[in-house]
Image (cartoon, rainbow, N blue to C red):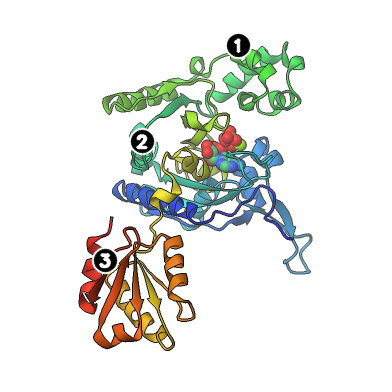
Amino acid sequence: MIRAIRGTRDILPPETALWNFVEAAVRDVFRVYNFHEIRTPIIEDLDLFRRSVGEETDIVYKEMFAWEDRGRAESEKGGQWLALRPENTAGVVRAYIENRMGERGLLQKLYYIGPQFRRERPQKGRYRQFYQIGAEVIGPLAAGSESPAVDAEVLALLAALLNRVGIRDWKLELNSVGCSEDRPRYNQALRNALADTLGKMCADCQRRAVTNPLRVFDCKVPADQPIIEALPRISDYLDAGCRSHFAALRKILDAQELPYTINDRLVRGLDYYTRTAFEFTHGALGAQNAVLGGGRYDGLSEALGGPRAPGIGFAIGEDRLIMTLGQSAEAIATPPDVYVAPVGEGMDPEAAGLAEELRRHDLVVELGNESFRLKKSLETASKLGARFAVIVGENEVKSQSFALKNLGTGEQVSVARGDLPKTIQANRT
Ligand code: ATP
Ligand code: MG
C-alpha cells in the first residue's frame, strides 16, 4: 500500500470544516485591517532562501527540501537548484521586488495562507508539510514602513485575529534584536562570553558561536540552558535608534492595553530579523508552544538586491492554531438539512428536481437513489445527521405534497411542495 509521505498528513472532513472556519475568520480580520492576499509559488530558487533565511539557520542548514532541476537547456552547465518553500516571507519579498510593488510609494499590506515544507523530525504539532497564515507589511521608507506604529498595528491585528477564532489565553513575548549597527558589538560580546564555556555546549552551539552567535539562543538542549541564561543581554547593546524605536512601540501597545512580556532571549530562527521580534505562545501546545512568530526585517529587500524597503511580518502555524482551538470539528461541520429519498422506479429525476429546488433556497441537500429501499434511505439520512428526510414517491409526485420526516423526533407530516423550504428552514438550528 502506498502511504502519505512521512511528516505529511491528510486533513479530512469534518476537520476541514475547522480549517475553513479559521481561514474565513482570519480573512475577515485581514479585510478590516486593509490587508490584501498574495499568492507566491511553492517552488523557488534555492538561493532565495540561502540569502534571506540564512545559511546558518536550522531551516536552510538541515530542513530544506531542495533538488537540482534538470529541466534546463543542454547548453547550460548544471541545473538550477530549486527548493520547496520552508516559509513565505522570502517569496513575498522576492515578489515585492520583482513586481516593483513599492513604486507607487504605498505601504504594501499583504497576507498569505498556504503550505510550507521543512524536513524536520515529525511529532505532534511538527510536520514536514504544514500550513502557515502570515502577513507582511513592506514598503519604501517614505510610506512609513519603518515606523513603530506599523509594528503596533501588526501586533494589534494578531491579537484581534486570535481573539476572533476564540483563542483567549495567548501570551505575547516581545524583544528587540537590534540592527546592523549594534549587532556586531553584541556578537562580539557573545563570543567573548562563550569563549570559556563553549567546550561544554552542544555541537550545534559550537558551530553557531563561530558563524552566528545569536543563533545560540535557538538551542533547545537542556544542559546548555544555564550557560545561555548567563549570556549578555541584547537589551544592553541596542543603539539609540533601536532603543527609541522599541520604546515607541511599547508606548503604543501600552496605550492600547495590549499585554506583552519582554523576553530578551527571543531572537527568532531567521537571520534577517532586525529590531522588533515576537512570538505568541499558548500553554495547550506544550513543548511546541509557539503558535506564531514574527518580526521586523529592515534590510531584507536590499539583501535580495531590491530597493530599500523596511518591513515587518509574522507567520502563524495553522496546524498548531487549530490544535489550540477549544472547538471540535463536529460542532462546526454542518450536516445536511434534508435527505431527498426517491422511492420506486423512475423517481430519480423527480427527486433530482426537488433537490435542486430546495438548494436554491440555500438548504443543504443530500440526494438519495431510487435503488435504495425506504429503510436504507432513512438509515443513510440518519448516518449523515440529516435533520429531515423528504420522500419522493409516485403518489407524492401526483399530489405535489411530500412526506417530510423529522429524523430527530420521528414525526412525519405531509407538506405541499411550495411549503417545503420554509418548513425545513423553520427547524434549522
Ligand atoms: P519552532 O521553534 O517550533 O521550530 P520556528 O521558529 O521554526 O518554530 P517559524 O519559522 O517562526 O517557526 O514559523 C512560524 C510558525 O510556524 C511557528 O510558530 C509554528 O507555529 C509553525 N511551524 C514551524 N515549523 C512547523 C512545523 N514543522 N510543523 C508545524 N508548524 C510549524
Ligand atoms: Mg523550527
Quarter-of-image position of residue 124: top right
Between the C-alphas of marks 3 and 2, the distance is: 39 Å
Relative image position of residue 373 (x, y in whole percent): 46, 76
Residue 194: tell me if it is visible: yes
Q: Nearer the viewer, mark 1 or mark 2?
A: 2
Tell whether 386 sits left or right of 399: right
Which residue is painted at 33% across and 34% down in the image? Answer: 149
Q: Amino acid at mark 3?
A: Ile
Pick the front one: 363 or 225: 363
Q: Mark 1 or 2 closer to N-term?
A: 2
Callout 3 environment at 10 Å: few (<14), some (14 to 19), or many (20+)?
some
Tell me the quarter of the image containing the C terminus.
Answer: bottom left
Relative image position of residue 368 (x, y in whole percent): 43, 75
Tell whether 64 sits left or right of 423: right
* Element type where label 1 sits in the image: loop
Q: Mark 3 or 1 closer to N-term?
A: 1
Residue under label 2? 159
Q: Amino acid at mark 1?
A: Ala
Looking at the rendered structure, which numbered label has been put on residue 424?
3
Which residue is painted at 32% across and 67% down in the image? Answer: 405
Quick check: which quadrant has ligand 2? top right
Q: Is residue 20 above or below residue 319?
A: below
